[in-house]
Image (cartoon, helix red, strand yellow):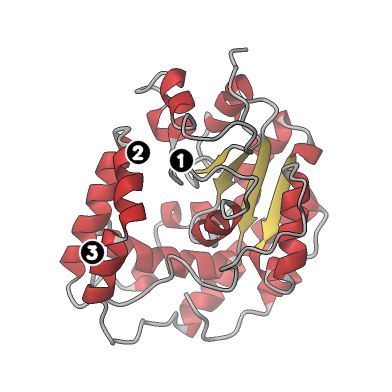
Amino acid sequence: MQHSLDINFIGIGSGKCGSTWLYKNLVSHPEICDANLKELNYFSDLYEEQPFSWYEAQFKGCACGLIRGEFSVTYISHPQAPQRVLRHVPKARILVIVRDPVKRTFSNFLHSQRKGDIANDLPFEQYIQNEDNLAPGRYAEHLERWFAIFPAQQILVVVLEHFLRDQLAGYRSIFEFIGLEDVGFVPPHYNSRSNEARSYRFLTVENLMVRTYRWLSRRGYTRLVKIILDSGMGYALRWLNSGSRELPQIDRDSQDHLARYFSPYNKKLATLLGRDLSCWEKSPAIFDP
């Protein structure tokens, strides 16, 4: 077992469940280092391309004594990620955030259009015929691999719908989980949304931005990506490119189809976590993606 880096927590997913918003609020805590980029993707995409020393270098900007952690949503479903994390940072606390998988699927559909991964005119009902697009919402399948090799007390699964009922209590539980002293800290922008879906006047501009970010990140240029993000240039360009067109809403037939599809997987997750997930069975016909 090869490990030497002191990492306090690793967020493993899931995508389109509020992970960007959550991570920004976590690193606003004065005890947590904010020097590294979210989405390092080391234990998934970069593990065979970069040595572990590359991963260690991502945290060199952290002042002595600060809690170190990262959040990469590609980890949760990657088949080798659990063993890789165990090999290098076995004591890291594993943080997970999940959301109603029906909403997550529709949100990811809009996000995939924004990234240029799917055609802009692809109907949602056709998108969900591909089970690969539904796999991320089968949370229990992915989490079973993590629970199989990490102690249950080392994994915290945050259900977004439960978390939003009392965010301050939710942050306190996370801060306690990752070992902070000031667990009563209130993130200054905890009520501000981040990375939400929006319409764009020129989708090709957004496609180019996201593809450039992804290309740089997946090749290890994380420092450059963080400099660009911290500069606010991307935010300014997105604001200028924002449109007034209303975002599409999921149709009732697709929602009902997905609710039936995910129902057995949700029950499996509820059993795995010992949690009540009935809130996912009461989704409204129209919801915010």
Which residue type carries mark 2?
Answer: Thr
Q: What residue sits 48% from the left and 81% below the top?
A: 253
Query: Callout 1: 10 Å neighbours few (<14), some, many (20+)?
Result: many
Q: Nearer the viewer, mark 3 or mark 1?
A: 1
- CB under 8 Å between discs 2 and 3: no
Q: What residue sits 20% from the left and 78% below the top?
A: 201
Q: Which residue is mark 3?
A: 206
| Residue sitting nearer the eye, 127 or 5 | 5
Dot 1 lies on which element?
loop
Q: Which residue is mark 1?
A: 36
Which residue type carries mark 1?
Answer: Asn
Q: Which residue is mark 2?
A: 222
Q: Position of residue 98 (x, y in %)?
A: 62, 58
Q: Where, by quadrant of the figure, is residue 164 drawn?
A: bottom right
In the drawing, does residue 43 fall left or right of residue 68? left
Query: Callout 3: 10 Å neighbours few (<14), some, many (20+)?
Result: many
Q: Is residue 45 in sight in this rendering?
A: yes
Q: Quadrant of the N terminus?
A: top right
Q: CA distance from mark 1 to mark 2?
A: 8 Å
Numbered circle sitting on residue 219: none
Query: Callout 2: 10 Å neighbours few (<14), some, many (20+)?
Result: many
- CB under 8 Å between discs 1 and 2: yes
Dot 1 or dot 2, earlier in sequence: 1
Q: Position of residue 76 (x, y in %)?
A: 56, 43
In the drawing, does residue 233 fall left or right of residue 51? left
Farthest residue, direction top: 1
| Residue sitting nearer the eye, 37 or 147 | 37
Q: Where, by quadrant of the figure, is residue 22 drawn?
A: bottom right
In the drawing, does residue 190 fall left or right of residue 210? right
